[in-house]
């Protein structure tokens, strides 16, 4: 297995496409950070933008599709099977190689971001906050790598696999965005209205109305699951965590959010709001479950799939 | 007799299509086994199944005595090399790099032997040319070198001479014969270029519609394919007496049929048989090549 893994790593990391993806990732991270610095406030710096990370996920699709697809296209998977390696071993080697690719690409984006803006990050955020936010994003990359590996083992054509991976990435982004918008709807809306008094004066008042867009019950549980499962959700959470404030933002400061959310418990989904800022352990847990499921699914697919 | 590969009633279904329909064959150790069949007969599917690329729908096979359901069969596959349809080589690497990758996958401690293998297949002086720029013959030869990296005892070659020029065909043929004779490697080679196969094979398996129609050694085939007259008579004993008197080589095939390995005038034969109270029913000339043998076997 170690020989197989070494072989896969050599092929994945030595390919021209991977090197180009790394270069592009670094460039995107740097350029975005430079752009943000241009609109920075001298006290609080500039807000964090997760766009280069999202774009890097798309680029990872190309690297994964060509790294895995080339083996199927050139028939070298066949010789590995003839040599005595099993399909399961081949899948695991490809999965680990793609994950390492994803980690490296993530590293290049982060390097670009930090090189251009390290002062802001280190001055405004504690190590704990940085670990949480970048750790969440790294987790998102790892789960995305698992998705891509499963797709590429199903679709052996490189171009088709790349396209499908990119579409899935877009789909995951839309899922994350749409579910978040639904889940952040308040349960009640305060509606202002006015009515005339007998004296001809206008009296302003307000009333509490149920929000028809608020999802409850099973629908809410489904939306929450979709939100946790979509890797781009972690990118969004990281972006919110790195909203910059005056002074250094630490993990202890996060608890202030819990108090703020308690005050508006009747209007907002308290559990979801806490889960989006404070109780971040749910994201890696869901990610782990998703990763395990994709690994099992991928092994089943490659086992059943006839190798041409 | 020791067999390297034995299959028993192998079936492989693809949705509504049966690629293999109860294929049973035996590849003797040390042979060059020619798998002969039309396009779509099931030759490539058989090789894919034996190599472990696909699972059979039913039936079984044994590789070096290990059944396919045994976990040990993966270990036996290490004694096998294969080229299925096209050689499995990294096009972005040179010949030597391809061999080094193969050696590292096999866990071989050093690169010793790579140069000898490349020289064996005639790719010693290729230098830094990438496999992408190789001719088809060169790719096939590199594929064979890669398959030989782990010194296999059994080599599967799926139509290795397709698309090659005449020189390429000769080179591959000579290489296969060399591997079989000098290294005692058993070779299973499929092809529909029968004239080439007839120069290589020691055994034949004729495949049609997913099953083996006949297995025959090259010796037996040569006997059957000799130029002869096939005579149908009422009394083969009488025919024997006539032919013995004439000193002609013959072979009694059945109660009413014999093969006569000489040119005789029909009228003389009929007259001689009449004197023995034997009727000559029919006489046909037979001059079978491998092609005609195959065509007769599978129809059309």
Image (cartoon, rainbow, N blue to C red):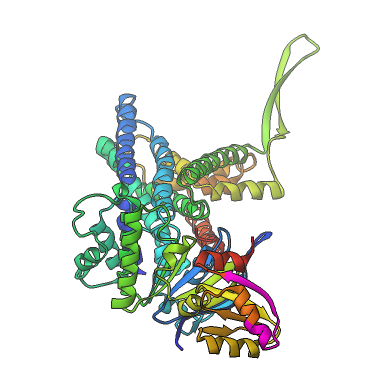
Q: Quadrant of residue B284?
A: bottom right
Q: Residue at x 50, y 55 (%)?
A: A150
Residues drawn in magenta: B272-285
With A281 as the anchor, is A210 left or right in this view? right
With B206 as the anchor, is A92 left or right in this view? left
Q: Quadrant of residue A89?
A: bottom left
With B157 as the anchor, is A107 left or right in this view? left
* Residue nearest the observer in this picture, B150 or A122: B150
* Figure disc tally: 0
With A305 as the anchor, is B86 left or right in this view? left
The vertical placement of B193 against A188, above or below, is: below
Instruction: Check residue B275 for magenta coloring.
Output: yes
* Residue nearest the observer in this picture, B91 or B199: B199
Q: Quadrant of residue A301?
A: bottom right
Instruction: Check residue A290 for magenta coloring.
Output: no
Asked if residue B22 shows in the view, the reply is no
Outermost residue, top side: A200
The vertical placement of B61 against B167, above or below, is: below
* Residue nearest the observer in this picture, A144 or B144: B144
The vertical placement of A221 against B200, above or below, is: above
Q: Residue at x 36, y 42 (%)?
A: A249
Q: Position of residue A154 (x, y in %)?
A: 53, 54
Q: Residue at x 62, y 86 (%)?
A: B239
């Amino acid at each position: 297995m170690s020989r197989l893994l070494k072989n896969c790593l050599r092929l994945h990391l030595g390919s021209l496409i991977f090197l180009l993806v790394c270069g592009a990732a670094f460039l995107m991270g740097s350029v975005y950070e430079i752009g943000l610095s241009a609109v920075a406030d001298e006290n609080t710096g500039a807000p964090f933008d997760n766009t280069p990370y999202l774009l890097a996920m798309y680029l990872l699709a190309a690297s994964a599709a060509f790294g895995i697809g080339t083996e199927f296209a050139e028939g070298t998977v066949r010789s590995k099977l003839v040599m005595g390696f099993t399909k399961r071993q081949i899948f695991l080697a490809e999965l680990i190689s793609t994950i390492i690719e994803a980690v490296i690409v993530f590293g290049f984006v982060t390097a670009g971001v930090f090189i251009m803006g390290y002062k802001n990050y280190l001055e405004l955020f504690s190590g704990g906050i940085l670990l949480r936010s970048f750790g969440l994003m790294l987790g998102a990359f790892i789960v995305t790598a698992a998705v891509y590996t499963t797709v590429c083992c199903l679709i052996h054509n490189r171009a088709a696999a790349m396209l499908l991976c990119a579409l899935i990435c877009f789909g995951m982004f839309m899922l994350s965005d749409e579910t978040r918008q639904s889940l952040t709807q308040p349960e009640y809306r305060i509606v202002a209205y006015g009515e005339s008094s007998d004296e001809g004066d206008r009296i302003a008042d307000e009333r509490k109305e149920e929000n028809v867009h608020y999802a409850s019950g099973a629908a809410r549980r489904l939306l929450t699951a979709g939100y946790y499962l979509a890797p781009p959700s972690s990118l969004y959470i990281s972006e919110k965590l790195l909203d910059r404030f005056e002074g250094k933002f630490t993990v202890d400061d996060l608890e202030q959010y819990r108090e703020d959310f308690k005050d508006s418990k009747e209007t907002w989904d308290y559990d979801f709001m806490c889960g989006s800022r404070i109780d971040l352990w749910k994201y890696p847990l869901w990610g782990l479950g998703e990763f395990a499921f994709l690994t099992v699914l991928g092994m089943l697919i490659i086992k059943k799939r006839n190798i041409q | 007799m020791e067999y390297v590969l034995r299959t028993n009633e192998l079936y492989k279904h693809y949705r509504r299509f049966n690629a293999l329909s109860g294929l049973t064959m035996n590849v003797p150790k040390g042979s060059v086994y020619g798998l002969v069949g039309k396009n779509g007969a099931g030759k490539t599917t058989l090789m894919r199944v034996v190599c472990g690329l696909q699972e059979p729908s039913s039936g079984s096979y044994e590789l070096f005595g290990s059944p396919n359901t045994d976990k040990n069969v993966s270990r036996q596959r290490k004694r096998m090399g294969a080229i299925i349809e096209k050689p499995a080589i990294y096009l972005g690497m040179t010949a030597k790099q391809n061999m080094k990758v193969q050696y590292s996958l096999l866990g071989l401690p050093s690169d010793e032997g790579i140069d000898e293998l490349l020289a064996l297949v005639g790719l010693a002086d290729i230098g830094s040319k990438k496999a992408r720029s190789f001719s088809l013959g060169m790719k096939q030869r590199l594929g064979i070198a890669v398959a030989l990296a782990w010194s296999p005892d059994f080599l599967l070659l799926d139509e290795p001479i397709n698309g090659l020029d005449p020189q390429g065909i000769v080179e591959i043929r000579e290489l296969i014969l060399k591997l079989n004779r000098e290294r005692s490697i058993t070779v299973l080679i499929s092809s529909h270029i029968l004239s080439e196969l007839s120069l290589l094979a020691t055994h034949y398996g004729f495949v049609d519609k997913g099953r083996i129609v006949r297995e025959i050694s090259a010796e037996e085939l040569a006997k059957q394919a000799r130029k002869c007259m096939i005579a149908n008579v009422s009394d083969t004993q009488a025919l024997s007496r006539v032919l013995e008197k004439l000193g002609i080589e013959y072979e009694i095939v059945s109660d009413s049929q014999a093969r006569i390995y000489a040119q005789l005038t029909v009228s003389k034969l009929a007259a001689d048989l009449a004197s023995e109270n034997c009727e000559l029913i029919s006489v046909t000339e037979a001059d079978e090549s491998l092609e005609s043998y195959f065509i007769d076997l599978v129809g059309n």
